[in-house]
Image (cartoon, rainbow, N blue to C red):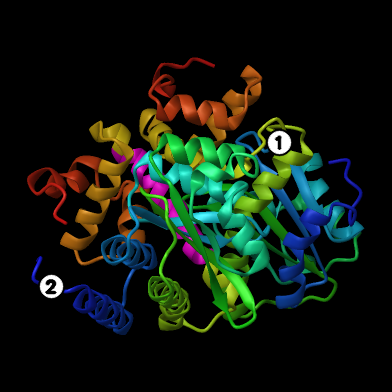
């Protein structure tokens, strides 16, 4: 949350396709956990960063809804929206007239959101929405890795490429152990890793090896 | 089967791939089948296909076997080994003797030797000027591929690229990178589904993959759809594994 937009080149590379392919003016990519504790991976400008920040200050907004519903949330005209009174009261002071939020889908798990804004009101057409959804799918894994690197988490993991399969397999096992969605299972693994001071990869490895079963974990 | 000459096998492989491209197919399934053909036709024991993701890193999307030994070796080769070198240079990397790679790639050397691999070949998967991935083949014996085998392997790698592009064109033309990433996303869903089946039915990860594949085939759906059903629990793990238990490893 303390990042200065534009200097994290990894994040900028993930944001670039949204700016190039969608009729928008700015984009913020963030990774959320189940408690909506976020890490901002990249914001293309100050307005995008602020729109994202308002969510965490006030606890509501289209990006949170996109995360919760795991689907795109489109607000073509903020001035005529009435769904998020707190969010809107702050957002309307900014240089943004339309907001579009897409879930970062990691297979069946949702790990964060991509929040896009436009200075002028107006909707996205069907092709744009599909493009946004697909781009968000494409950057979910890299964005998640970027968030871990920025958070200083898992940096001892010399080869992040090796962790991925186990993390996804463990997500499948934990969703059954807890009888929850893939998104919640993934969030629980992250929370467990965080509270125990271990890496997500270590948690995943223990789950896959059947040394750790979340149905018997109390936290 | 022994009556089939190698030439016939190669021809059959290309015909089978061309046939597959004419129908709606699952890309991970197609690539896995293609790699199984490689191990059948070429003097190699295992193989994998890696595609580049949005951050420019290689991800393993399909392999001839889901065995940890194979998967681990190829993934390490993608971190520091022949695969990443092939991807970076855009040229094939031939490792005629893994035993000679200890200085260059110590982890790859250790893992490959431990898993019984003595040779490795990494072939670029090209789309026009861009390298979009790598096909990695692993052999049990030291040695290089003959000029001819190299040609066959490269042709199969080229077919893999066609398969990835073509699958998406069935739906709608999209950007190339988007097509690659949807393939990567399928793989994530499959891994999540393997986890569900592994926990629900006490299967190993390779068994879980076979069960998922069996369920997809029995129901005429793609692996991706079968994986989605599993992870979203629209079908129970017992239902998905039912057919597999009755008819194990129908290869």
Q: Which residues are magenta?
A: B181-197
Q: Which chain contains the residue that carries disc 1?
A: A
Foreground label between 2 and 1? 2
* Left or right: residue B137 compared with residue B214: right
Instruction: Please provide percent x and percent y for residue B216.
Output: 24, 59
Instruction: Please provide percent x and percent y for residue B115.
Output: 40, 38
Instruction: Please provide percent x and percent y for residue B39.
Output: 31, 60
The residue lying toward the viewer, choosing from B77 and A190, is B77
With respect to residue A2, does A203 lie above or below? above
Instruction: Please provide percent x and percent y for residue B86.
Output: 60, 62
What crowding class fits label 1: few (fewer than 14 Cα within 10 Å), some (14-19), or many (20 or more)? few
Residue A37's disc number: 1
Res A124 → quadrant: bottom right
Viewer can see residue A73:
no
Tags 2 and 1 both on a single chain:
no
Placement of the C terminus of chain A among the 4 image quadrants = top right
With respect to residue A184, does A203 lie above or below? above
With respect to residue A188, does A23 lie above or below? below
- Which secondary structure lies at badge 2? loop
Residue B4's disc number: 2
Placement of the N terminus of chain A among the 4 image quadrants = top right
């Amino acid at each position: 949350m303390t990042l200065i937009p534009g200097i994290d080149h990894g994040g900028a590379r993930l944001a670039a396709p949204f700016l190039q392919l969608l009729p928008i003016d700015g984009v913020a990519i963030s990774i959320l956990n189940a408690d909506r504790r976020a890490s901002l991976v990249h914001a293309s400008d100050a307005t995008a960063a602020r729109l994202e920040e308002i969510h965490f200050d006030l606890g509501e907004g289209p990006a949170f809804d996109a995360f919760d519903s795991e689907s795109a949330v489109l607000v073509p005209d903020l001035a005529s929206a009435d769904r998020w009174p707190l969010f809107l009261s702050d957002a309307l002071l900014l240089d943004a007239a339309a907001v579009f939020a897409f879930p970062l889908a990691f297979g069946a798990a949702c790990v964060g959101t991509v929040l896009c804004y436009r200075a002028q009101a107006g909707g996205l057409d069907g092709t744009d929405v599909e493009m946004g959804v697909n781009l968000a799918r494409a950057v979910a894994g890299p964005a998640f890795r970027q968030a871990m690197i920025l958070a200083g988490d898992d940096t001892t993991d010399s080869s992040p490429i090796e962790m991925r399969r186990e993390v996804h397999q463990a997500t499948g096992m934990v969703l059954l152990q807890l009888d929850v969605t893939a998104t919640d299972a993934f969030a629980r693994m992250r929370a467990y890793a965080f509270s125990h001071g271990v890496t997500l990869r270590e948690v995943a490895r223990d789950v896959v090896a059947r040394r750790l079963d979340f149905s018997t974990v109390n936290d | 089967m022994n009556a089939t000459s190698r030439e016939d096998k190669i021809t059959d492989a290309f015909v089978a791939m061309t046939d597959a491209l004419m129908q709606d197919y699952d890309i991970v399934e197609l690539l896995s089948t293609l790699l199984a053909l490689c191990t059948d036709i070429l003097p190699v024991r295992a193989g994998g296909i890696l595609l580049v993701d949005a951050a420019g890193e290689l991800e393993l999307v399909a392999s001839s076997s889901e065995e940890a030994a194979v998967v681990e070796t190829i993934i390490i080769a993608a971190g520091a080994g022949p695969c990443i070198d092939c991807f970076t240079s855009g040229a094939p990397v031939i490792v005629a003797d893994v035993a000679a790679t200890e200085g260059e790639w110590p982890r790859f050397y250790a893992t490959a030797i431990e898993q019984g691999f003595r040779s490795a070949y990494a072939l670029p998967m090209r789309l026009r000027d861009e390298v979009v991935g790598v096909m990695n083949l692993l052999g049990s014996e030291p040695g290089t591929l003959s000029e001819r085998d190299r040609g066959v392997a490269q042709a199969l790698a080229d077919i893999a690229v066609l398969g990835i592009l073509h699958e998406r064109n069935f739906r709608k033309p999209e950007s190339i990178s988007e097509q690659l990433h949807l393939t990567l996303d399928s793989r994530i869903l499959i891994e999540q589904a393997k986890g569900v089946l592994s926990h629900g039915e006490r299967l190993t990860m390779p068994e879980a993959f076979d069960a998922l594949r069996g369920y997809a085939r029995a129901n005429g759906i793609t692996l991706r759809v079968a994986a989605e059903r599993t992870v979203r629990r629209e079908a129970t793990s017992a239902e998905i594994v039912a057919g597999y238990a009755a008819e194990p490893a129908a290869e």
